[in-house]
Image: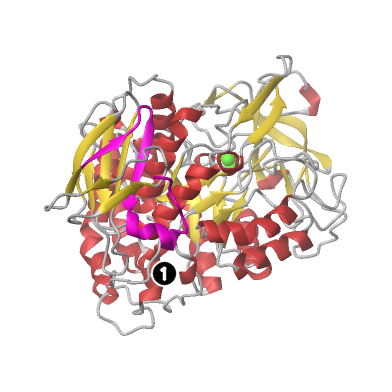
Amino acid sequence: MRSGTGARSAAFRDAPIRPSPSDSPGGVSGDASPLHTPRASLDRLKLILSSAMAVSFESLKRAVLDAERDPSLDTAQAAISLVRQWLATHEPELGAQAVPVPTEFNGTMMQWFHWYGDADGQHWRRLKEAAPELAKAGITGLWLPPATKGGSIWDVGYGIYDLFDLGEFDQKGSVATKYGTRAELEETVAACHAVGIQIYADAVFNHKMWADDHEDYRATPYDPANRNRPLEGEQPIRAWTQFRFDKRKGLYSTMQWHWYHFDAVDHNKFRDNYNAIWKTQGANFEGNVDLEKGNYDYLMGCDLNINHPEVRGELKYWGRWMHDTLKVDGFRLDAIKHISSDFFLDWINDLDQHAQHSHFVVGEYWTYDLGSLSWYAANSGGRMHLFDAPLHNNFHIASRSGGNYDMRRLLDGTLMQAMPLLAVTLVDNHDTQPLQSLESVVEAWFKPLAYAFILLRDQGYPCIFHADYYGAHYKGRKSEDGPEIEIWMPSHRFLIDRFLLARTHCSYGPQYDYLDHFNTIGWTRLGTPGHPRALAVLMSDGPAGSKWMEVGKRHTTFRDLTGHIRAPITTNGDGWAEWRCPGGSVSVWVEEAVLPEMGVTLPV
Ligand SMILES: [Ca+2]
Ligand SMILES: [Ca+2]
């Protein structure tokens, strides 16, 4: 199926959701609901996934669980094949709904922050100013950093204190967050919506930090390296687990948090130097989480007990509140490998029911293991997109291989290949950038190749990283006592803007792949009736390359939009040509006749 579905376009934001459908899987086709308009294809797609398919999803889930119990099956492989089977089985239904959309355009997301951005409280204001030019460049969605109050104005937002303080109350040393005030955020969201850009909020549900006071209760210490191994018996502990939000005074939500809302903490004031994960009395570590360390429910801070009814209720209420107050179009869910996957289907359904339309949701499950990603995708009912961490890792390895990477393998083990419908593709993010915990940066020379790969292929919903677009300059340390290191990340904006032009104007229709050479790989896009322009992309991680590829346009002159190669290439009478690219680089060939509508002049 085409995954470049109009799906991601901002134009679909307000499409209505069909009221509670019949449970008949056949009910998704042939009805005369308002969804049968071209502009609603995204919501139709998501609706199908969410409603009619939920029934068959349950049977998929049972099948996966059965496969897990069968010792003769490789679980990861079984999960992958079952998910593929599920998507494939429903492809006819989904395909039948995919009305050709002559005005479709390809959506592109940007992660509008990086870890070391200035803590000057001006981030929202800067975005408000940048919104029109971002829209013009082809950005249709923005993932914003956590807007919720953390420990201080230096907190990137993942050290979360109060979900309901978006920079409005004098808590943790300031009214504003690192990014500004709630009023500025609201203005910025409105400015983005005014130019057709969707807003995705970062939701941190795994933990809370910076409690207001400590509490005494009982807990059992567990081995941090093996969460299935208690170190001692249950005993009295004193831990910082009370969250009162005094300055907010119960506005928006009256809930105060106590020790029994958390399933574990990593400190006990009675035994300061004892290294353990303290599991709350009566609580269990959550199931359906990553299995590293035996059970990876606990990550940091006060870990939310997602099975506590008050916690579940509050997180659902917050989702509805964010929809009502900030009018966000979707969410990026933080650290989901540490949260029971069963929760999110419930959470997304609640949100969509409340809003009467579907939301875009992408989860951060950071692993390079396709089996784990497939399992999570299946367990969240196909409702949640996932970041394509394995593709990032392939880019990273290729960029470190000095031209000796087998480019035919760039798609191996990726979501882009296995589950393109659910893949959010990326090159780098705030965790992989230099000096960060998961540092695995894609080297600068390879970034243009990687961005061409995520922006100009049919599969995946691409996400551009702020620091790659604007560049970044910062100082930091890899460890507390390590030396200070200065980092320069160059801006790739010129080429990314060119790729966005190609994405917007000529990345449509059938895709012919030529991923067939150790160094030089390429593909073409043939266009659609609505977007008839063709495209040819060629890249090499080794010496300069060339390749015969078909674009379906006869006797047509093409130019390299990157400017890397100046000489034009003209196709033969069969719509083929021998395309070229420089060594360690990429060329993006577009029809010369499309340049004026792109507003681009290329030197001859
Ligand atoms: Ca957790
Ligand atoms: Ca938990």
Residue 3 x, y percent position in the rendering: 33, 56
- Return the residue at label 1: 43
Identify the image quadrant of residue 182. bottom right
Relative depth, front residue between 300 and 139: 139
What residue type is disc 1 on? Asp
Total marks placed: 1
Q: Is residue 599 magenta?
A: yes
Q: Is residue 224 left or right of residue 575?
A: right
In which quadrant is the N terminus drawn? bottom left
**Residue at the left extreme of this rendering:** 574
Residue labelled 1 has its Cβ within 8 Å of some atom of ligand 1: no
Residue furthest to the bottom:
32
Residue 370 place in picture, x, y as percent: 35, 37
Is 327 on the left-hand or right-hand side of 574? right
Badge 1 local density, few (<14 within 10 Å), some, or many (20+)? Answer: many
Residue range in magenta is 578-604
| 259 or 545: nearer the viewer | 545
Q: Residue at x 46, y 28 (%)?
A: 445
